[in-house]
Amino acid sequence: MRARGALTTGALTLACGCLGLLGCGRRATQADCDLIFNRFVEIELHTMHVTDPVEVAKREQAMRVELKDDLQKCPGKRITDSMLRCVQNAQTNDEIDKCTTF
């Protein structure tokens, strides 16, 4: 299974809100990156109508392996609290992409 565009253009890698602007936001923690990844997975599997807990866990693990590089690059990227609120409220992964890019 291929995660849709590696978080559709790399939301985890781009979870930096203010890409080159110093002093904007803060550095992402592992918890911040997990929140973005978990929300992405939740929406992706919901879109695919995958609800069986065993299948959800299996696919989440597969996505975690597939997106390993993005997950490792995420901590330390610049993010803002408003970006994380946007991710939490997103209803589609396209919305997550919009939350994590400027």
Image (cartoon, rainbow, N blue to C red):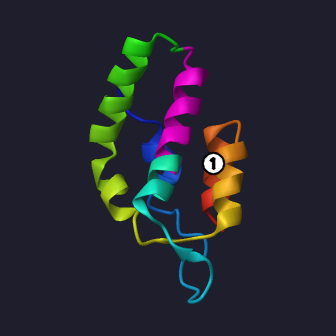
Comparing 70 with 30, the one in front is 30
Residue at 42% x, 35% y is 3
Comparing 94 with 55, the one in front is 55
Comparing 3 with 54, the one in front is 54
Relative image position of residue 9 (x, y in whole percent): 50, 52
The residue lying furthest to the bottom in this view is 22
Relative image position of residue 52 (x, y in whole percent): 46, 10
Relative image position of residue 46 (x, y in whole percent): 59, 22
Q: Which quarter shows the N terminus?
A: top left
Q: Check disc 1 and report its element: helix, strand or loop.
A: helix
Magenta span includes 25: no
Residue position marked by numbered label 1 in the rendering: 96
Comparing 22 with 10, the one in front is 22
Query: Quarter-wise, where is residue 19 in the image?
Result: bottom right
The residue lying furthest to the top in this view is 52
Residue at 44% x, 64% y is 29
Q: Which quarter shows the C terminus?
A: bottom right
Above or below — where is 89 with respect to 15? Answer: above
Query: Along the horizontal axis of the image, is 30 left or right of 98?
Result: left
Query: Along the horizontal axis of the image, is 91 left or right of 77?
Result: right
Above or below — where is 79 with respect to 34? Answer: below
Above or below — where is 3 with respect to 46? Answer: below
Residue at 64% x, 50% y is 87
Q: Name the chief secondary structure element in magenta.
A: helix
Residue type at tag 1? Ile
Q: Which residues are magenta?
A: 36-49
